[in-house]
Image (spheres, rainbow, N blue to C red):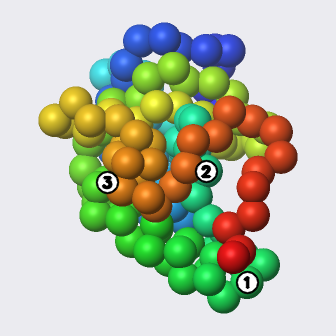
Amino acid sequence: MLAVPSLAFAVPATVGYVFDGDTFAAVVHLDKNTDVDVRVRLINVDTPEMNGKCESEKQRANAARNRLMALVPNGSIVELKNIKDDKYAGRIDANVILPDGRDVGRVLINEKFGRAYSGGRRESWCD
């Protein structure tokens, strides 16, 4: 976890393994001598779960994960903004910004791989 409750400024991170459509591992570069390994969950987006409740959700989850892998391939550099501690230890929530300035969560929502999410109970992905 980061030792601050929230970071409004952008920090660079190197992308590692993509877990699912809205979570990936990263090394966050806080300064030239401080790197932190964390899981990053995209703020304000919900994607289907890999262990979904129906076959349709599982297929959508694989598609969302593949799209996230294409957007933030292993080893790529992204910026993290609006960093907050997550409910799970070792994970943070953040807006993830691509080098071209696009917000990854917004891309996933616009391309129908995810939907806007502001907390609380999530809607079902099953038809």
In the picture as drawn, the residue positioned furthest to the top comes out as: 8
Left or right: 67 as drawn, with respect to 5: left
- Which-is-in-front pick, marks 3 and 2? 2
Depicted 66 relative to depicted 79: above or below:
below
Q: In the image, what residue occupies the spot 16% across and 35% down?
A: 100
- The residue tagged with tag 2: helix, strand or loop? strand
Furthest toward the bottom, the residue is 55
In the rendered image, residue 103, in percent from the top left (x then y), is placed at: 35, 35
Image disc number at residue 87:
none
* Mark seen at residue 46: 2
Instruction: Name which quarter of the figure residue 54 lies in.
Output: bottom right
Q: Do the residues under discs 2 and 1 have CB atoms within 8 angstroms? A: no
Front residue of this view, candidates 87 and 63: 63
Q: Quadrant of the N terminus?
A: top right
The local secondary structure at tag 3 comes to loop
Residue hosting label 1: 54
Q: Residue 50's x, y, as percent?
A: 64, 74
- Location of the C terminus by quadrant is bottom right
According to the picture, the residue beneath numbered tag 3 turns out to be: 72
**Residue 34 versus residue 71: which sits nearer the camera?**
71
Q: What residue type is labelled 1?
A: Cys
* Any part of residue 17 in sight: yes
Q: Disc 2 or 1, which lies upstream in sequence? A: 2
Rounded to the nearest angstrom, the CA distance separating label 2 from label 1 is 17 Å
Question: Which amino acid type is shown beneath numbered disc 2?
Answer: Asp
Mark 1: give few (<14), some (14-19) or many (20+) Cα within 10 Å: few
